[in-house]
Amino acid sequence: MEESISTQTTVSGRIQRRSMSNTNEKNPMHTLKNINLINVLYVGSRSNIANILHGATADDETRLNVITVRTISDASRTLSEGPIECIVSDYDLADGTGIEFLRTIRSENISIPFILYPAEGSEKIASKAISAGVSEYIHQGSNSRQWNYVVDQIVTTVKKSQSQPSSDEVINQLSSLIEHTPIGIIQWDENLRLERINTCATDILGESKEELQKTSLEEIISTLTTVDNEITSQHLSSSDHCKFEFLSPNQEDNKYMRYEWRNHVLSDEDNNTISAFTYIQRCDNRGQSAGRIEYKTIIESLSDAVYVLDEKGLFTYVNEEFVELVGYDRKKIIGNSPSLIKNEKDVTKGKHKLRSLLSDDGSETVTFEITLQRADGTTVLCEDHMGVLPYDGDTFEGSVGVLRDITEQRKQEKLFEAFVEGTDDIVSVVDSDGTIQYQEPSVKHILGYSPDEVTDKNIWQYIHPDDREAIKSEFFSFKSSPDEKLNNVEYRVRHSNGSWKWMEANGSDQSDCPAVSGYIINSRDISPRKEREQQLQLFDRVLRHNLRNDLNVIRGSADTIKSKSSSEAAWLASKVVNNSDKLLATANKQRKIMRILRDKPTQVGQNLYSIIQEVVADMESNYPNAVFNIDCPNDTVVTVADHFSSVIREAIQNSIIHSNTENPKVDVVVTDAEEQTTISISDQGPPVPKMEQRILTDVENQTPLYHGSGLGLWLIKVIVDRSGGTASFAQTSEPGNTLEINILE
């Protein structure tokens, strides 16, 4: 066996080797007495793990002492040589795997905490480890928080193990029960040598416990006057629930009594004998007690509240956990019926479940919920796990059950349900591979799916192909790191109508929470925000184009002025002024657009007639030669976005500016129908270029704009969209342009 590693490595963070002499300089021995050492056996070849863990501290009172070996055989030898409180094992070992070592440990009934810490883990390895009885499974990480987590898991697992009763303690709890039962009970080891025997059995066999412990099973059987002389120890060790009858003299009158010997063999998955139990009772008393106390069932269930009922449904045994749970004295419970702790409805439910167990096609155990009535009047929600005691022939001998308090679990579930149902976000619970286990109802109004449509479906199928791999990487990275969270991840999700919505997701690992048992993904619709971002990007592109062109004209004209005659200079100066005015107007429009885009979109009811009259009044003062024809009912009210007056202003001003006439004419006609209101603004100017017309229908694919009206059209598009309406240029046979704006009622 390799020598254990003792390291002085110091790691930043909470994991560090503490110097005890510095903890209490006046009295170092005081520190030594208060330090709790946990002896950890590390099995593997990754020296960095042992180096980091050795001397690590989880708190001020607990420190790890790590012993390192590389093979399963050396590990087994170390376990036999001294106290080990926790095993940390790699998966790939020199003489086998960590799971093979774990199975060996558990087959020997060693309950020591076992943590599997593979270099490269997988769902398959994790599943096998859990099936083999692993205490914790930890995926390999690299940061200091990972090491902190490993140390915490070691300490937590060890303390949890120490807080539960040991096997010896469990046996001690049963000793009184076994000693006072009228059935002779014997426990044998894997070699069929006597391990434990009660007084009833020694009286029947006529030998002391000390003498019988020196004798094999075969030798004991050979001393009995058997009714069936063909019974042998080999037969007993290879047959479960084997029985035979024998004669033994009564100690009082030396007369022979007939007894029944019943044997129950416990084997591992390879059919190797682990232990065996013998039950001995008088044949004429068989119906009174046989099988009412099934040793194997009780010893496997003592960590929870355990009860045994006889064939009449009366309590014959309860453990301490049961007494503590119900709050009644044991004397009050024994001999009473379940109606003591259950209401009539739950008693009836229990009888119905028992009948299903006794049916020909019934299962071995059933689980159902009951409301337990405690002695102090309070109630506790419990799961009742019930099975039937083994019996021969048609004679039912009773049932055994385990009660488990699930009050807190149900409380967590209700809190979780209240949380997810009260949020406007989409709350999903997914398992480790992304399959949706639970879907909150808000998915219907956000994405158009009912919860049932997406439950049990893989979440990746709804994510945009361009975003899928990146999101998968984020999810599996978050899933493999216990302390990490999924924060503000943006991606596109397919709506039921085929469109794509932008979502922002946050996630947390709730796999250890009974109410969740998975990963919570909280998704928020950020499509409006993404749309605004795209609009701002487009605005920036358009604005930069217009400003660049105008500034180039100004700079070019100004440079030419210096070298030209005075007459030419005057003409060029006028161009400088005109383009400066255009630049100033663009800047002013920029400020207006930026202000609109920063504001959160809101809709209000506005009088359309008043808006048009106000805009036209301003236009008449600025453009006195313009002619306006207005046809609008004075009571037309529409629900539109803030700044809707800018839509009317931009449309009318564009018609005037680009009319190319001294007396521009603008017609404004409003038609107020039942389902929508239509605003038509017509002029007699040259046609608006197709490229600029597409501004109203295709925001994402803009091409450079040829004149300043493009920016105004884009502003119209933004505000009309926020109003839930549409804007487009109508096809007319008359010269000029007609802009139609439709607002839905």
Image: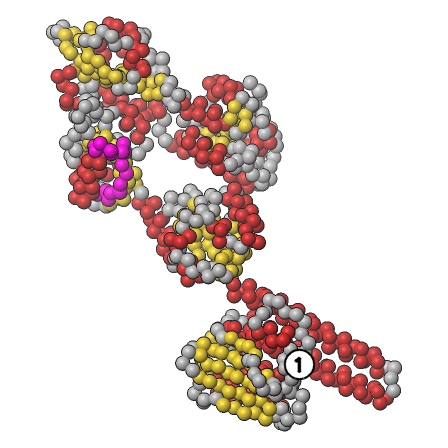
Residue 29 spot, x, y in % from top left = 51, 28
Q: Residue at x 32, y 32 (%)?
A: 303
Q: Residue at x 43, y 60 (%)?
A: 448
From which residue to which does the magenta span run? 357-373
**Relative height, residue 508 to residue 289 (above, below):** below
Q: Residue at x 68, y 76 (%)?
A: 706
Q: Quadrant of residue 596?
A: bottom right
Residue 487 spot, x, y in % from top left = 53, 52
Image quadrant occupied by the N terminus: top right
Res 352 visible: yes
Q: Is residue 658 magenta?
A: no
Residue type at tag 1: Ala
The answer to whether 735 appears left or right of 327 in the picture is right
Residue position marked by numbered label 1 in the rendering? 585
Residue toward you, 459 or 431 = 459
The answer to whether 172 appears left or right of 572 in the picture is left
Outermost residue to the front: 733
Residue toward you, 11 or 103 = 103
**Relative height, residue 365 to residue 601 (above, below):** above
Residue 437 spot, x, y in % from top left = 41, 48
